[in-house]
Amino acid sequence: MSFEQKPFLILFIVVFTAWWIVRRHERATVALLLAASLLFYAYNHWFLLPILLAYSVVNWFVSRRLEHSLHPRFWLTSGVGFNLLVLCYYKYTPLLMQTLSDAMPGVIPPLPANAFEKWSIPYGISFYAFTGIAYMVDVFRKTTPAEPSFWRYTLSAAFFPHLVAGPILRPNEFLDKVRPGQLPIDPEAPGEAMWLIARGFFKKLVVADRIGIAIDPFFAHINDPTTAGVWALPYVWLYALQIYFDFSAYTDMARGFGMLFGYRWPENFNSPYFATSVTDFWRRWHMTLSRFLRDYVYISLGGNRKGRFRTNVNLMLTMLLGGLWHGANWSFLVWGGLHGLFLILHKQWSGSRLAEWLAGRTGFARWVWHAVALVVTFHCVCLAWCFFRLTVFADSLACVRKWVDCDPAKMWGGPWCDPAVWFALGLYVTLMWAADSCRRLATRPGELRSSFATGAVWGVRFATIALAVLIAPSGAKSPFIYFQF
Amino acid sequence: MALGALAHIRIESKVHLLARLRRVAAFACGLTVAVSVIFATGELYLRITPPGDLAEYLGTDSPKTGPFRSDPRYGAQYRSLTALSDDNPGKLAPYQHLFDNPQPPKVWAFFGSSFAQAPGMLADTTRRYVPTRTTFNLGKNEIFPLRLAQAEFLLDQGLPVERIFVVVIPLDGFFFALHSLDQIRVSSAGGISYAPRFPTVGGSLVRHSRLALQGWTQTGLHVNQPFYSVRQLNKRYDGRMLADFTAAFGHFADAAARHRVPVTVVLLPNHEQTTRGAGFAFQDAVTPVLRDQGYDVCDVRQEFLAYPDKPSLFIPDKHFSDTGNRLLLATVLEHLRASDPASRDLPDPLTVRP
């Protein structure tokens, strides 16, 4: 089930109404939200439910043992091992078998092209596996106590707004709020929640899906004569925007729905394409994953405590793992490797005299340097996106080649110029500006002005949702990109 | 004293109520203004740059471009041979020598969906196994009535044809569930567009507001037969859909008779009918219509149903495999040899049959 589908809308209305009635009774609240979450996850995919429940049972049991056992390291290894093994089994078996079959044709018989055609990865597994690992490590580090109630722990792991595509939450960000006596009984900032949901709907239905319609045919035919001479760079720019709008839309909606039940979760994006270095980009892009990788992988590997060379190795390993987390394909490894390389290069560059001199500029010179850094960073990220979007290596390389190898006559035409896409982006910017202006106006003194602006703020929220539904591309809706991870 | 206090309270509460009302009114005004401005912006967006999915339903106002002119019989027709040629770049050139040829070879022209046109499908299979005929096809999957319009247009332009094959699958008939013939429009720039079905309540709003029209198309109720689904093709095919089918083929039957060209309509079974025992409602409904109009109908269902290894007849996207296409061609050849004395020189179907 997905947020933009009608069954979810019905489920949400029913669950929210029921929650409103039972919210002062903790047991009933936990039971209701847990049942709704399992229904959300298993809708049309009942066979996936045992996997989610197995994760919950193991993580809950291991965390309890971690607190009381004399061998906590053993239990941590077992728990993390289980999470990773199941994750790897589902995500990487096809890749592993294909690679082994290609590498050792004598040992493993060649696999038919459609050998793993029906192989499906339980959706959201990467997210709930990582949430579980974070929980067990935190219990091991004694930064959070293990939750005694299996039901409350399962609710924290499987609560439907964050289950499928994050944000990846730490125990203190959610689990602590489902512990006895902590369950919220009122929505958290309902106006803000509504705006997050409205913004998410608009980002996904209008902007991301509209961009997808314009660019998908190009990427589908990147290596055939129909795209010969076409300039790839604008398509990659648009893909960068599509994946941002698609993923941040999900996070916005997840946070908005969470807030309606009283839970405030951290931001996952902070204008990532305004980053002036790849290091800065990772502080702004998928922030809860970056945080997870930093706290549970990079620091566990030694972080920057063991000299420059080991720091660089740790950075690269962390980013390679981050790449592999996204999917079972070598192209994701290349994506992670490129980001690792950019991070290392930036680290070297930051220590240089030239970088220090440039950072010390003021006025116009500083502005120019800032713009150059922003453009270079954006294109580094775009270069990596080529390997993320196109999972066949030859296609990724063809895409990169077409950044420069193109027919000038075909540069300023084609689907990327579709005015509907650029106007949709313009409409989004206008709506953001309008919402922000109304919010600022509402806080100014003056009773009537404030009431008028408050009405306008609510008007913007409702109209944005309505407009998103009305002007979304008609026909089959495309799923969220991050559902596949 | 008490009365005075009461009056004071009343006045105060009135003032309070008035202030409250003013605040509520201001709130309502703010809400209305915001909603109106945002909807107006949306309307403006759809007016300046109507996206492709909306342009499809803007009728003659659509910004779509193409090589067509409006046609009362098929909805659309090509403006000229050059326009058709430009719309099929490089595809018409190999057949140019056939036009105005005093002694043309025997030409079989294929019209139909991807089952006829796509690489490796019926036209290509015929080209491979029937060397005694020149196979004509443009390799493009046009909308259903346009295939007949294209065939008539090419006959009118002097394409010498011994026989025309119109390949029809049940899915083709679904076109009329989406758009009836009288809903087809041609924009001023020559693109094909459609007039939507308007709602009985609020129809005027949908007619005049693009935002409302876009919203209406989201409901799926804007099509000709909104409650008819693809899955029903194997169960029933009737009413307005069959009437449109009859009309389009009726016009083409007249054109073929005028040019004295025999036409074979090849009715193909789909994947569900062949492998899962689905019904043949579509074929059963159109066969008597086509026979009445004088077409030679070749329904190949028996051969496909009798084939022992049915899954091998299809490729994963449910088009016919090479085996399927050879079985299809062999069946068509058998049908022609049995029904048309002029077809005795055709290859033995056994050499084609898989």
Image (cartoon, coloured by chain):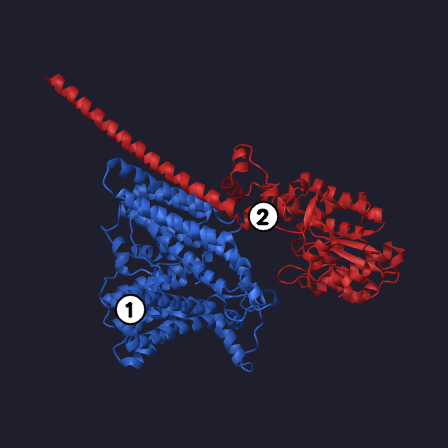
Chain colours: A blue, B red
Can you name the residue that lies furthest to the right here? B341
Chain letter of the residue carrying label 1: A
Q: Is residue A132 visible from the viewing direction of this image? A: yes
Residue at point 67%, 43% (across, down) = B236
Count neighbours of disc 2 (C-alpha within 10 A) and say few if under 14, some if 14 to 19, many if 20 or more.
many
In-image side of B237 versus B213 (left or right): right
Give B157 or B256, whichever is nearer the viewer.
B157
In depth, the one of B19 and A185 nearer the eye is B19
Asked which secondary structure carries label 1, the reply is helix
Is A184 placed above or below A381 here?
A: above
Q: Which element carries disc 2, helix, strand or loop?
A: loop
Q: Position of residue A344 (x, y in %)?
A: 34, 76
| Residue B128 position within the rendered picture, expressed as x and y whole percent measured from the top left | 77, 67
The image's mark for residue A295 is: 1
Q: Quadrant of residue A299?
A: bottom left
A393 relative position to A29: left or right: right
Hey, which residue is sitting farthest front in the picture? A364
Which residue is at the front of the view, A89 or B247? B247
Residue at image coords 26%, 53%: A177
Label 2 resides on the chain identified as B
Closer to viewer: mark 2 or mark 1:
2
Residue sticking out furthest to the bottom: A106
Kindly identify which residue carries mark 2.
Answer: B63
User: How far is disc 2 from disc 1 in space, using C-alphas?
Assistant: 54 Å
Q: How many marks?
A: 2
Q: Residues within 10 Å of mark 1 (few under 14, many from 20)?
A: some
Q: Above or below — where is A429 with respect to A347? A: above
* Amino acid at circle 2: Pro
Q: Is residue A125 above or below residue A207?
A: below
Q: Is residue A482 visible?
A: no
